[in-house]
Image (tube, coloured by chain):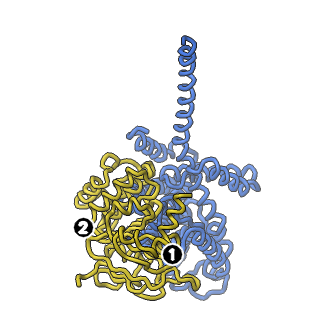
Chain colours: A blue, B yellow
Amino acid sequence: MKKWLRPALDLALLAALVAAPLYLSAYHLSLLGRFLAMAILSLGLCLVWGWSGVLSLGQGVFWGLGAYVLVMHLKLVGLQPGDMPDFMLWSGLDHTPGWWTLFRHPAVALAGVLIVPTVAAAGLAWLVFNRRVGGIYFALITQALALAFATLLISEQAYTGGFNGLTDFTTVLGHYIVDPSFQRALYWITVGALAAAFLFCRWMGKTNFGKVLLAIRDGESRIRFLGYNPAGYKTIAFAIGGAFAGISGALYVLHVGVISPAMVGVMPSIEMVVAVAVGGRSSFTGVILGTLLVNFGKDWISSAMPEMWQLSIGLLFILVVTLLPKGLAGIPELGRQITERIRRRTARRGVEPEVLAITQKN
Amino acid sequence: MQNALLSVENITVSFDGFNALDGISLRLMPTSIRVLIGPNGAGKSTLLDTVIGNVRPTKGRIVFRGEDITELNEYKIVRRGICRKFQAPGILENLSVLDNLSLAARPRRESWRSFGVGIDSSVRARVERVLERIGLEEKRHTMAGQLSHGQKQWLEIGMVVSSHADLLLLDEPAAGMSLDESAQTAELIRSLASDHSFLVIDHDMTFVEQLSAPVSVMHMGRMLKEGTLEEIQRDPQVIAVYLGREKEEAVA
C-alpha cells in the first residue's frame, strides 16, 4: 500500500463520522454513536489481545464499572435535596451510602469513570501476571470475573438496582439528555474520544513499549531472557484496556439511557471479543470497522430474527477464525496474495507457447 | 587466584527424584570460552537453564561477579549481565532486525521507562557495531521472520551480545548450519571473546575444534572431564561414554 493511502483512508473515515449528523436520521445517529463508544473498548482490547496476546473475556466488567460510576452520578444529580434514589427506598434503605454520594460531584464522577476501571484492571493483571498465569487460564479467570460481577450486581439490589439496573436519569451537567442538540454534541464527543484513543494507540504502537508488547505476544520467554519483565508490560497494557473500556461504558450509557447486569456479563464480553476478531485483532482501524459491522449486524439481525443473533455471532466467529484469521484488516493482504497468484499463473501460461515454438524448431 | 566471572558451586537439580545435575561445579574466567559437550541427557541444557534462573537448583549456589544469583528472577539475572541463546532461534519474527537488536540493547528495560519513540543514539551506535559484527548490515530493515536459518542464529547471537551481558550462554549456536556458516559462527564467537565470556554447548566436533577453547565433558549430570579438545579426545573414559558412540554412529 502507498504510504499516504493509510492516513488518507483514516482521515476520510474520520470526516465521514464527523459529518454523520448531516446525512443520518436521529435514530441511526444514536445507533452509530453507541457503536462508536463500543469501538473505544475495542481499541483497548486490540492493545490487550492483538498486541500483547492476552485474551480477556471479561472486558464487560471494566466497561460496566465505567458505566455504573457515571450512572451513580446521574442518579444523584437528578434528586431533590434530601431525596434518595428510588430503588434504594423500595429496598428499604434509610440513607444513601457514602460510596454512592462520593460521585455526586461531576469532577469526582469523571475521575471515577477513568480511575475505577483502570485500578481494577491493573490490580487483577498485576496479581495474575506476576504469578506467571497467562494464556487460556487468564481468559478463564476474566470470564469468571464477568460472571461474578453480573451476579454481584443482581444480588445487591439495594445498592445497584439489581437485575433491572439503573435508568431514569434525565440531565447531564444541566442538559436534558433527550434534547437533540445534546444528542448531537454527545455524538461528536464520542467521535472525539474515539479519535483520541485511536491516536493514542497509534503512538503506543511506535514506542518501545509497543514493540515489547508485540515481542511478548510472539515470544514471551525470549523477551524475559533479554531482561524484560513481561508482567509489568502486560499490566500496563491491561490497565489501558480497562481505562478504554470504562470510558466506552460511560459514553455508551449516555447514548442508551440505561445500564443493567445483562449488559456487562459473559455474553456481552464475548461479543466484544468477536467484534475485535472480525475487525482483525491487531489492527486499530480494523477493530473499529469490525465493531461497527458486528454491532450494526446485531441490530439488524436481532430486529429481523431475534432468536438468530447468538447463533449468527457464533457462526461469524468460526468463519473469521478459520477463513480470515486477520479479520477485515487482513483482506488487503489476502487480495494481494490472490492477484499475485493469478499473475504468476498467467505469466507461466504466457511462457509456454514460446517454449513450445523453440522445441518445435529444434 | 584470579576472580572468576561465573562460579557454579556444587549444583544439584532434581526432577521427581532424578538428578538431572548431580553436584556440578564450574568456574569461568572473564573473556574466556568454555565448551560443554556430552551425550544427550547429560544435563548440559539444564546447567544453562540453572545459571539463567529458568530452573531452580535443589542444592548448591551460583555466583556471578561475586554476587549470589541463585534465587534471582530470570530478568534480574539478565540485568546483572548474563544472557542466554536457546537452541531454536528465539528471535522476534514480527519485528525488524534493527528492532530486535535495539530491544536487546536498551539499557532501561522497565515497562514504565519504555514510552519513548525511536532509538537512542547510544543504543543505535551499539546496534550498528553488532550489525557489522554479525554481518547483517544489509538486512537491518528486514523482518526477522524472513531471514534464513543461519542469519536467524546470528541475529540471536547479536541480540545476546547487544544485551550488555558479559557472560553469554549459547545452546548449539551452529545447529542446522552449513559447514561455511558454522565456521563463520565459530570465528564470530572467537572475535567476541575479546570482551565477553562464553559457555557454549555443541555436538559438532569440527565446530568445537574451531572454537579452540577448553572443553568440559558432562555425563549423567556430572562433570566427567575437563581439558583441551585433544586431551579429551584421547581420554578413554570420554571415548567410552561419548566420543566412541559418535564414531560408531558415524560408521553406521
Around disc 2, counting alpha carbons within 10 Å, would you say few (fewer than 14), some (14 to 19), or many (20 or more)? few
Residue B42 at x, y percent in the picture: 50, 74
Q: Residue furthest top?
A: A361
Please tell me which residue lies in front, A332 or A95: A332
Q: Dot 1 corresponds to which residue?
A: A132
Q: What label sits on residue B195 in the rendered view?
A: 2
Q: Is residue B110 visible to us here? A: no
Q: Residue at x 39, y 55 (%)?
A: B182
Measuring 64% from the left and 77% from the top, which residue is drawn there? A148
Contact between labelled residues 1 and 2, with CB atoms less than 8 Å apart: no
Residue in the picture at 35% in, 47% down: B139
Q: Position of residue B65 (x, y in %)?
A: 28, 80
The amino acid sitting under disc 1 is: Arg
Q: Amino acid at mark 2?
A: Asp
In this rendered view, identify the residue nearer to me: A91 or A218: A218
Disc 1 chain ID: A
Badge 2: chain ID: B
Seen from the viewer's position, the closer of residues A212 and A26 is A212
Q: Does A232 sit left or right of A260 as displayed?
A: left
